[in-house]
């Protein structure tokens, strides 16, 4: 009975993580596309300093996580020390910056296409760097989800969307997305390693450590010299207050989303987190398609089936693994 209750609580926590990540990042995706394509003010200027969004989000999430730790953990949880996050902090600063800068050169659907295979480098980095072993069914699930989202994103690409780009340059855009995936793979695998070495590490500890180092690195990059892009971004926000509001909402979504991402990583591991976030990209495209009144084609519905087949199979594998663990406990 206790095992059944624990399993049910675990499922409820996972459902909460899925709902939190989807709602926060679907809206953040809308804001991200707005900030990368919209022309602000009567002068019609674009917000060219997209990497500034990462610094703003780091600061908001750093403050948020510090407050949460004080509220829920008191003086400290005994988790991983802050210095352990210096290396994933570097890759977590560079990777997302490259991913968001790619929106200057390729369309949002194309960016989703390139980044939807994120779970693959996570598994590769986990295997090559940390010796983590995944099963063949787990690889099958990953390829089904990534392949379905990638194909769907490719089919949805339109010339109208491409015409909104600031500096169309497909090779550069895809290169930035590829590098983003590589850095993210190292970041997620390293986070798994840290939580394994320090089991008492909470989601707030991870969030605080990652955003502390991200804030430090981004401040150095953007404000270390007089002509840094940070000064230009602030000046743009002063001249276009509507952009400031969009950036604030973008950061707020990021803070809420990071809570659920780090909770997912600490409870279920980086592969589960990557599956949820990749599927979120798929759902955001579906929502966008519905809201814009564009019906899905037969091929796109095929992608829907492909993605959710992979997710259903992964849920079945997790359920079967849980059943085996319960049988072993009863036998012992």
Image (cartoon, rainbow, N blue to C red):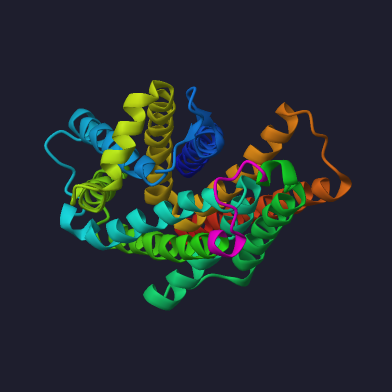
Q: Is residue 83 above or below residue 47?
A: below
Is residue 281 visible in the rendered image? The answer is: yes
Q: Is residue 178 above or below residue 158?
A: below
Q: Residue at x 78, y 49 (%)?
A: 305
Direction left: furthest residue: 75
Relative to residue 287, is residue 322 drawn left or right? Answer: left
Whole-percent x, y for residue 111 in the image: 59, 52
Between residue 68 and residue 232, name the one nearer to us. 232
Q: Residue at x 46, y 74 (%)?
A: 127
Relative to residue 326, is residue 160 drawn left or right? Answer: right
Would residue 325 be counted in the magenta stretch? no
Whole-percent x, y for residue 221 in the image: 25, 53
Q: Is residue 308 above or below residue 283?
A: below
Between residue 308 and residue 217, name the one nearer to us. 217
Q: Bounds of the magenta span? A: 163-173
Residue 67 figure quarter:
top left
Whole-percent x, y for residue 104 in the image: 53, 49
Is residue 207 visible in the rendered image? The answer is: no
Between residue 115 and residue 24, name the one nearer to us. 115
Would residue 167 be counted in the magenta stretch? yes
What secondary structure prevails in the magenta region?
Answer: loop
């Amino acid at each position: 009975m206790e095992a059944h209750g624990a399993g049910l609580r675990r499922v409820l926590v996972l459902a909460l993580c899925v709902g939190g990540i989807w709602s926060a990042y679907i809206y953040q995706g809308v804001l991200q596309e707005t900030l990368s394509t919209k022309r602000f003010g009567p002068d019609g200027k674009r917000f060219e300093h997209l990497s500034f969004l990462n610094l703003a989000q780091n600061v908001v999430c750093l403050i948020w996580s510090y407050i949460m730790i004080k509220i829920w953990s008191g003086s400290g949880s005994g988790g991983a020390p802050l210095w352990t996050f210096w290396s994933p902090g570097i890759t977590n600063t560079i990777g997302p910056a490259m991913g968001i800068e790619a929106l200057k050169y390729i369309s949002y659907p194309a960016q989703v296409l390139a980044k939807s295979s994120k779970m693959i480098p996570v598994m590769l980095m986990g295997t090559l760097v940390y010796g983590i072993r995944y099963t063949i069914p787990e690889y099958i699930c990953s390829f089904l989800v990534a392949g379905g989202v990638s194909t769907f994103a490719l089919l949805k690409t339109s010339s109208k969307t491409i015409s909104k780009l600031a500096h169309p340059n497909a090779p550069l855009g895809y290169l930035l997305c590829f590098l983003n995936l590589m850095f993210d793979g190292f970041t997620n695998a390293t986070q798994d390693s840290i939580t394994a070495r320090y089991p008492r590490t909470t989601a707030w500890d991870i969030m605080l450590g990652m955003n502390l180092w991200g804030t430090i690195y981004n401040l150095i990059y953007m404000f270390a010299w007089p002509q840094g892009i940070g000064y230009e971004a602030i000046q743009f926000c002063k001249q276009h207050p509507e952009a400031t509001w969009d950036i604030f909402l973008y950061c707020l979504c990021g803070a809420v989303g990071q809570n659920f991402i780090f909770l997912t990583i600490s409870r279920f591991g980086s592969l589960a987190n990557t599956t949820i976030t990749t599927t979120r990209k798929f759902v955001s495209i579906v929502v966008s398609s519905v809201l814009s009144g564009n019906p899905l084609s037969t091929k796109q519905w095929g992608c829907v089936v492909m993605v959710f087949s992979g997710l259903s199979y992964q849920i079945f594998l997790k359920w079967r693994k849980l059943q085996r663990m319960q049988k072993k406990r009863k036998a012992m």
